[in-house]
Image: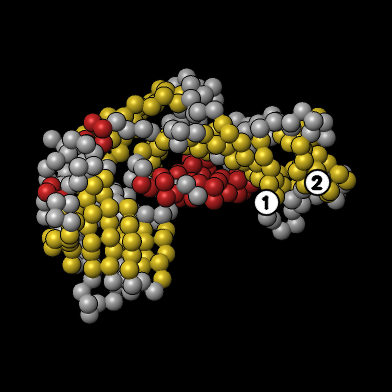
Amino acid sequence: MVFDDGLEAREETALVLQTEEGGTHTLALPAGWAAAPTAGIGVETGVARTSGNGAILVDFDLEDLGVGATQATAAASPVAVDVTVTAGDRQITVGVVNRTGVEFWAWGIVVDGVAVASDEALPAGGEAEASARTFGGVGGEVFEPVISVAVSRRLFYDDRFDSADFQMMTGLAGASERQAGQLRREGVYFFGFTDAAPAALAVDGRAAAAEGTTLVVKRVTLDTDTLIALGRAEPDIVSISGASTIEQYSGQVWAYGAQEVVFRYVVPDGVSQSVQVDPGGSQLREVAAYDWAVGEFVTVAWGEDLDRFLSPAGEIVLRARPPAERFFDEGIQLYRYAATWSAA
């Protein structure tokens, strides 16, 4: 997987080595990579060392037809996909130009934690568009739709797809899930699947071809005008009080027995009217907004205009509580608690 968050790009890949003859076999990675053991029943994890020229060598002591595996990471070049964004009327359209030199056989965008996939491949040098509504995602794991879309595309459109490919594809979900929180909160991402090898490899001193699939993700940086046109922003949860247990699954939080939840919103500069939060029915029925002018919380209602509670930095803080007699056992889906405003 290659993940480019706009500040730095990182590459993470699982490498599996199988040889006919047992003995000590060495997998070589270019300088700049790091290797770590990876778990697996019946899989040799290997021992990593650094050669004199800086290359990473992973030694495996294998039996005949034995299997060795390692998890490799490295800094990556920025993902060479040019992205333009147009937003309006709660719809976002992303235009892409693929300058990576490889084909993405499945690609699309992630908006509010939901994947929207193109029906066509994106060839090297190709240009395309994808659009999505921005009313908020559904519950569940952020990248699950991406994996499902890609697996389905291979299954139905590629006669070469087999069970080994399926295992490889679904294995990407674990690496993707570690980015789920960031993907959920920060809006818009490009994703693409390619069969290009992650790095130049060698086994026992001889060049070796790696076969597999790489998931490429690039964060799309949105300017202020686009953020305003989107018309919504999901909150961060500042604190939860009184809960017996707290569990978070991507964009949903379960806080059993919570007595108070504090939400923080950041509204783009330039929005100053018709800011509202309305989850459309919630066990958190008692709501108060922080009044920055007087330094205390003031009782409000869901759906009420919150313009006067904007701080100079564009922040709104809400405190929400269930009735005292009610045991709180509702999932807090962040997209339902999004702040919305007029983009006109």
Q: Secondary structure at mark 2?
A: strand
Dot 2 surroundings within 10 Å: few (below 14), some, or many (20 or more)? many
Query: Which residue is at 22% across, 50% downward?
Result: 316
Name the amino acid, label 2: Phe
Disc 1 and disc 2: Cα gap in Å? Answer: 13 Å
Q: Say whether residue 98 is left or right of residue 158.
A: left
Q: Of the residues under marks 1 and 2, which one precedes in the sequence?
A: 1
Q: Which residue is mark 1?
A: 38
Query: Which residue is at 41% across, 71% downward?
Result: 245
Q: Is residue 80 above or below residue 9?
A: above
Query: Which residue is at 33% across, 72% downward?
Result: 242
Q: Which residue is mark 2?
A: 60
Quadrant of residue 214 in the image? top right
In the displayed image of the protein, which residue is found farthest to the top?
Answer: 125
Q: Is residue 31 above or below residue 18?
A: above
Quadrant of residue 55 in the image? top right
Q: Say whether residue 180 is left or right of residue 210.
A: left
Depth order, front residue of 135/306: 306
Name the amino acid, label 1: Thr
What is the image's colouring? secondary structure
Q: Is residue 84 in view?
A: yes
Find residue 76 and report its horizontal and vertical position in percent. 56, 31
Q: Is residue 209 in view?
A: no
Query: Which residue is at 33% across, 61% downward?
Result: 239
Which quadrant is the N terminus positioned in?
top right
Find residue 247 and report its horizontal and vertical position in percent. 42, 64
Q: Say whether residue 322 is left or right of residue 239.
A: left
Report the disc number at residue 4: none
Task: State yes or no: discs 1 and 2 in contact (Cβ < 8 Å).
Answer: no
